[in-house]
Image (spheres, rainbow, N blue to C red):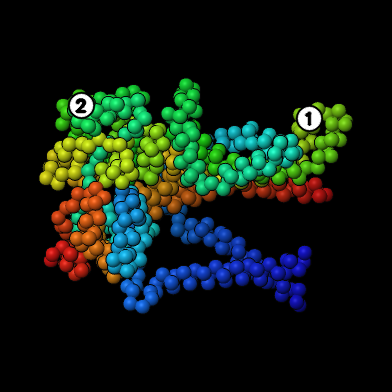
């Protein structure tokens, strides 16, 4: 009796917290109708921000995988001197408010900085371009990916890699055949979180990439130009577009972990 | 582990209780005053160009002088108007640049506004820009103002401005270039050479969010940018003063300014007009909101505006003057 009361209390507590967390999403569904979504999406050029967001988000993920994964692995395996310093560096970029990251990026990659001038030779500009949007999204999402990937690699028993090496695998082959498959569920989750951050990136974006508009800025500018009613449908689009990847990654990750437990 | 699991709902409820208690205590503290202090807070939504004045100077002075609290929210005038219309925000007072950002709120949210101060468009420049010597010569009067515009036309010139679809400053800068083309007898392609085409594009690489525009200039990443004169002075920027014929700061030249125009989102055509700050009360007047507007119009309030670089205009009401609170009318001498 006592146990079932405790279970009911646990369930009620969980439900309260879950509903509170979902509050904004639930509220969104009360304030958009199929009609408002349809009319917002049928406006000329309304789908462009969606394409821009997907394009920038996917390139951001590719950059994170290529550059963030090796760093995360080196951090997880303690292959870097003064490891805590490296970790503190990643945490520092996580702690900075995205708006501040954007302001500092002006100094770092603005068109008249050395980096900006070097980019100019490549016909790239990190201000108000798709490239700038990708830069902002990378900076907003990279710490989440690197820290998540580090945790995923740390969960892989190094002895498995050592055994592969004893069996003659070179480090790259051991990484491909042992480390990456074992860390994959955790890496998928890290990537899913990074994707969500990239798709929702706003603070750094509004500073260095006011356009082309991705979905978050489209919501902001639509709110400014025509008001809340026409802005909210784009929030729903953002949810619908951004959610499948994290959900798929979560389900796959959970299934992979379940299979491993046996 | 099981004990920990059993305990967590209690922790969740206690945490929720603490949060609710904190929220309720903070709201009660904001609504109650001590002793004979006036109650309430003036919630003011205002054009972002008033941010320094309102947050650093006027808000604290108002609180000290009148005892009411002050809470401000800066934004682009058109954006704030849209948010008020959508009931996304519910300020007591709305201060905008130009009455055309308040009239769309007639009569549901307000029936009047009062024009009380003005500013003018100026060009702020980067002292490290390769064009800085020329800017300095123009600013000091050694070179004519009309030399400014061919510089802005140059390929690779980094100009910053705000979105004409949402921000009066963005539109005013375009009006200014249009007026300058006539004033300086420049070729008819000058406007598009400087600003690109279409003029109302929000996606021009020159267009920045108002909140970040001057950050780009101060970081040395733009050659020049649009600014209000008051803003340039408050932020200690280098700037070029423009003649009254094009700076939108002279109410007597309203007819001339009207010749400049731009069509913005929604196929709405806007015309140039003197840059005037207007304000009104949104919804039912509160004592704090009314006191705020009355203080803006009082000699003490007007002195603060003048000190911070704004032009004082004779307060004039547009709309239903019968709806203007008596305390506000009293400061206007009526």
Q: Position of residue A80 (x, y in %)?
A: 71, 36
Distance in Å between CA atoms under marks 1 and 2: 69 Å
Q: Is residue A181 above or below residue A230?
A: above
Say which of A231 and B295 sits in front.
B295
Task: Residue under label 1, please give it.
Answer: A171
Relative to the observer, which residue lies in front, A174 or A31? A174
Q: Chain of mark 1?
A: A
* Residue A252 x/y as whole percent: 70, 46
- The residue that appears at 43% across and 48% down in the rendered structure is A219
- For the question of whether residue B267 can be seen, the reply is no
Which mark is drawn over residue B133?
none
With respect to residue B169, does B127 lie above or below?
Answer: above
Q: Quadrant of residue B331?
A: bottom left
Nearest the eye: A234 or B141: B141
Chain designation of label 2: B
Identify which residue, A165 or A91, lies in the foreground. A91
Residue B288 is left or right of residue B6, and the answer is left
Both on one chain, marks 1 and 2? no
Q: In the figure, B8 relative to A259: above or below? A: below
In this rendering, would A206 be left or right of A159? left
Picture coordinates of residue B3, whole percent (x, y): 76, 68
> Callout 2: helix, strand or loop?
loop
- Tell me the mark number nearer the camera, choosing from 1 and 2: 2
Marker disc for residue B143:
2
């Amino acid at each position: 009796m006592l146990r079932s009361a405790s279970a009911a209390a646990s369930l009620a507590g969980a439900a309260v917290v879950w509903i509170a967390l979902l509050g904004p999403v639930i509220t969104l569904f009360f304030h958009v109708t199929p009609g408002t979504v349809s009319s917002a999406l049928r406006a000329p050029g309304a789908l462009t921000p969606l394409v821009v967001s997907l394009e920038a988000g996917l390139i951001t993920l590719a950059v994170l995988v290529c550059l963030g994964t090796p760093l995360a692995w080196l951090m997880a395996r303690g292959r870097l001197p003064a490891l805590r310093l490296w970790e503190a560096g990643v945490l520092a970029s996580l702690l900075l408010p995205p708006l501040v990251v954007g302001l500092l990026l002006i100094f770092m990659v603005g068109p008249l900085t050395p980096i900006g001038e070097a980019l100019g030779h490549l016909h790239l500009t990190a201000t108000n371009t798709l490239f700038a949007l990708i830069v902002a999204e990378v900076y907003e999402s990279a710490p989440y990916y690197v820290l998540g990937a580090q945790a995923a690699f740390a969960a892989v028993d190094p002895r498995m890699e050592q055994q592969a090496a004893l069996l003659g695998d070179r480090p790259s082959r051991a990484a491909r055949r042992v480390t990456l498959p074992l860390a994959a569920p955790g890496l998928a989750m890290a990537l899913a979180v990074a994707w969500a951050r990239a798709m929702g990136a706003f603070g750094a974006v509004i500073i260095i990439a006011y356009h082309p508009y991705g979905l978050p800025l489209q919501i902001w500018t639509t709110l400014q130009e025509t008001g809340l009613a026409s802005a909210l449908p784009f929030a729903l689009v953002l949810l619908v577009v951004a959610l499948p990847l994290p959900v798929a990654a979560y389900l796959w990750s959970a299934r992979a972990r379940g299979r491993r437990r046996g | 582990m099981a004990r920990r699991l059993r305990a967590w709902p209690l922790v969740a409820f206690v945490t929720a209780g603490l949060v609710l208690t904190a929220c309720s205590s903070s709201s009660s503290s904001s609504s109650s005053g001590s002793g004979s202090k006036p109650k309430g807070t003036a919630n003011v939504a205002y054009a972002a160009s008033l941010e320094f004045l309102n947050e650093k100077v006027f808000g604290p002075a108002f609180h000290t002088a009148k005892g009411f609290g002050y809470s401000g929210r800066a934004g682009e005038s058109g954006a704030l108007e849209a948010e008020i219309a959508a009931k996304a925000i519910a300020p007591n007072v709305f201060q905008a640049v130009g009455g055309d950002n308040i009239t769309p709120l007639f009569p549901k949210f307000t029936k009047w506004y009062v024009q009380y101060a003005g500013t003018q468009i100026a060009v702020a420049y980067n002292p490290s820009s390769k064009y800085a010597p020329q800017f300095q010569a123009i600013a000091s009067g050694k070179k004519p103002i009309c030399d400014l515009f061919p510089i802005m036309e140059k390929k690779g010139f980094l100009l910053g401005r705000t979105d004409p679809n949402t921000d009066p400053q963005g539109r005013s800068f375009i009006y200014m270039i249009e007026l300058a083309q006539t004033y300086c007898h420049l070729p008819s392609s000058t406007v598009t050479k400087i600003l690109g085409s279409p003029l109302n594009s929000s996606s021009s690489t020159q267009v920045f969010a108002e909140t970040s525009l001057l950050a780009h200039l101060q970081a040395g990443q733009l050659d020049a940018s649009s600014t209000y004169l008051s803003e340039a002075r408050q932020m200690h920027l280098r700037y070029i003063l423009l003649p009254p014929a094009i700076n939108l700061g002279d109410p007597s030249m309203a007819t001339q300014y009207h010749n400049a125009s731009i069509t913005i989102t929604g196929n709405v055509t806007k015309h140039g007009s003197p840059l005037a700050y207007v304000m009104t009360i949104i919804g039912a007047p509160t004592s704090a909101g009314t006191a705020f507007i009355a203080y803006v119009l009082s000699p003490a309030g007007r002195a603060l505006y003048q000190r911070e670089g704004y032009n004082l205009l004779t307060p004039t009401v547009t709309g239903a003057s019968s709806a203007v609170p008596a305390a506000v009318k009293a400061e206007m001498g009526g």
